[in-house]
Structure formats: structure tokens, C-alpha cells
Amino acid sequence: MLTRNFSVHDYDLAGTLTSGQAFRWRPSGEAWEGVIHGRWVLLRQTSPASAKDVDPLSSTIEATVAVPEKDWQWLTDYLRLSDDHAAALASFPDDEPMRAATSHCRGLRLLRQDPWECFASFILSSTKQIVQIQQCVALLCQHYGERIPSDTDATAHFSFPTADRIAAATEAELRLCKMGFRAKYLLDAARRVSSGQLNLAALPQRPLDEARAALMECHGVGRKIADCALLFSLGFDEAFPIDVWVERALQRLYFPKRRAKKVRLERFAATHFGPHAGLAQQYLFHYLRTAKRV
DNA sequence: TACCAGGCTCAAA
DNA sequence: TTTGAGCATGGT
């Protein structure tokens, strides 16, 4: 089967794919083109024709692949279609910033990406704009990924390179992908994963603090990058990455009168936002980046 | 031209 | 413990 429809509720596909958690999605007309676990995928969201008895939040995500699939669980997992989104929203603190963010970014969701791809991508993210991260990741895939089939083949598509493949490269070679000083960081992480010194697949079974510490053993990986990998790929829904945008949001919305240090914000986030703090964080991030005035 | 970007390391105070 | 320079690169 090359195409399958998924019924969804309160799901903003475009907002989710462009909210800075994944870097390989490109618009293709009304649809979105990307690569998930080495498969080329085209996703299109369609809303039902307006009618009184139709839930306005219900819609369909149509997925098209290039190679026939029997089992689509990989896509259900990636898009987290089985999540109880209403319960997650209900767990958020009932305060004005969260009400504004959830109202403005209706249907925003978390993705569950491949751990290595997610970790490597965020290693490349430091002091880069999202557009630049996308360009850098695309170059990395072109140089070190495997070419994969798509529906048109008008443009080449590539898988995300394995840690083994990147570990076999040199820092100078990686720098050709415009990653600058991050090349040595990516190489260090790839070597640790490739050698088995860092076992990403085992991290979900460990406590949050231990999993974070394991990732931060990699040179160039601090708490922010580790938390992104934990939240967007390893199933730690309580992880709360604090980057410049989220720090700005927390400062402006929760500590407007006095400047709070990063450690203070981390402690606040760990207790204030509940078991789905990571999703709350994504709402604040996307809200601040897309709202005209906050 | 100047500033900034989903940061982090390292040295100096 | 805290602070700030430096790191590559490209967009605005």
C-alpha cells in the first residue's frame, strides 16, 4: 500500500513539522515532504467539509510512500498519533501564559524521531538559526546518507547517515557540510555511538538524570542539546529544553520583574509544568516565535 | 556593517 | 561560582 489515511483530532501537522523539533521537512504544494527512518514520505492534512455535525478539530493526514508498506506503525509512532493529547493539555498549569500559548498554537504536537538523527541534528543546532540547521542537515544527508526512492525522483532524497558512517569521516570532511566548529562535536558523538560507548537505545529505560548525563558525556553536548534528544526522540516527556527563546519566554511571562538565572528557571520548569513539561515547553517556544506580540 | 541564531567550552576573576 | 570571549556560518 502506497497511501494510507489517518484520522486525527486537534493535530496541526504544519505547525508541528515546522516547530523546530525536526529539520528534514519541506513544503511540497499543500503537503510536506520528508524522510522517516530511511523512507521518503509525503504528508498531507485535509479538513472535513464544513458541516454542522462535523467536529471542526477532526481531520485526516494522508501519507504517501514510494515503496509499498504493510505495517504503518513507524508513522503512528513518529507522529505520536496514539497520544492522549487532551490529557496532556489538561495537565498543564492553569495560568495565563499557558492559556495564551495553547490557544495560539492549537494542535501543536511532539514528534518521536529516530534518536541518533535527533541527537546529531541538535548537536549541529548550537547558535544556528533553524533554516541554517536544515541546510546543514541536508548537506550531511547528501554527503553521507544513502539515496532513497521517492515518488518522482525529480530531486534526490537521502537517508540520515548512520553514526558508523559519520564516525568514519574526518573533521575536515564534515566541515564541508558547513557545520563549522560543531564538526568535532558531531564526530565525537558518532564515535561514541558507533563504538557502543553510548547506547542510545538503552536510555529510555534509565532515569531522566542518568540519561541526560550519559548524553552530556559527549564533547559539545550540554543540558539543552541533551534535553532536546530526550524529549524529541527518547520518550522523556518531562524533559524541558531551555534555549534562548524559552529562556526569554520564561523570563518575560513568569519572572517579569526580576532577572532569573538559568538554574532558577530550570528548577521552576521542573516543578511548574507537570508530567508533560516538554510539550508545554514546545508551546511556549512556538508561541514566542510565531505570535506577533507576547 | 552590525547583530543574532533551539550552545558549549574554557580560562580568568 | 560567575562571567565573558571565542567558535563558523549565513540571514536580516
Image (tube, coloured by chain):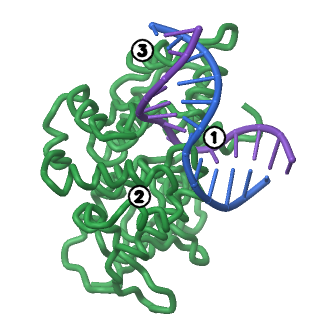
Chain colours: A green, B purple, C blue
Tell me, yes or no, whether the two marked residues, 1 and 3, touch with CB atoms within 8 Å.
no
Disc 1 designates what residue? Answer: A104
Question: What separation in Å lies between label 2 and label 3 (alpha carbons)?
Answer: 35 Å
Relative to A81, say whether A293 is above or below: above
- Residue A255 seen anywhere in this rendered image of the structure: yes
Question: What separation in Å lies between label 1 and label 2 (alpha carbons)?
Answer: 19 Å
Disc 3 designates what residue? Answer: A267
Closest to the observer: A102 or B9? B9
Sequence-wise, the earlier of marks 2 and 3 is 2
Dot 2: few (<14), some (14–19), or many (≥20) neighbours within 10 Å? some
Question: What separation in Å lies between label 1 and label 3 (alpha carbons)?
Answer: 26 Å
What residue is shown at x 37% (from left), y 39% (from top)? Answer: A221
Closest to the observer: A116 or A280? A116
Whether discs 2 and 3 lie on one chain: the answer is yes
Relative to A188, say whether A219 is above or below: above
**Host chain of mark 1:** A
Relative to A275, say whether A188 is above or below: below
* A212 left or right of A15 in image: left
The quadrant of the picture occupied by the C terminus of chain A is top right
Name the kind of residue labelled 1 in the image: His
Please, what secondary structure does the residue beneath circle 2 have? strand
Tell me, yes or no, whether the two marked residues, 1 and 2, touch with CB atoms within 8 Å.
no
Please, what secondary structure does the residue beneath circle 3 have? helix
Closest to the observer: B9 or A54? B9
Please, what secondary structure does the residue beneath circle 1 have? helix
Percent across and percent down for residue A267 are 42, 14
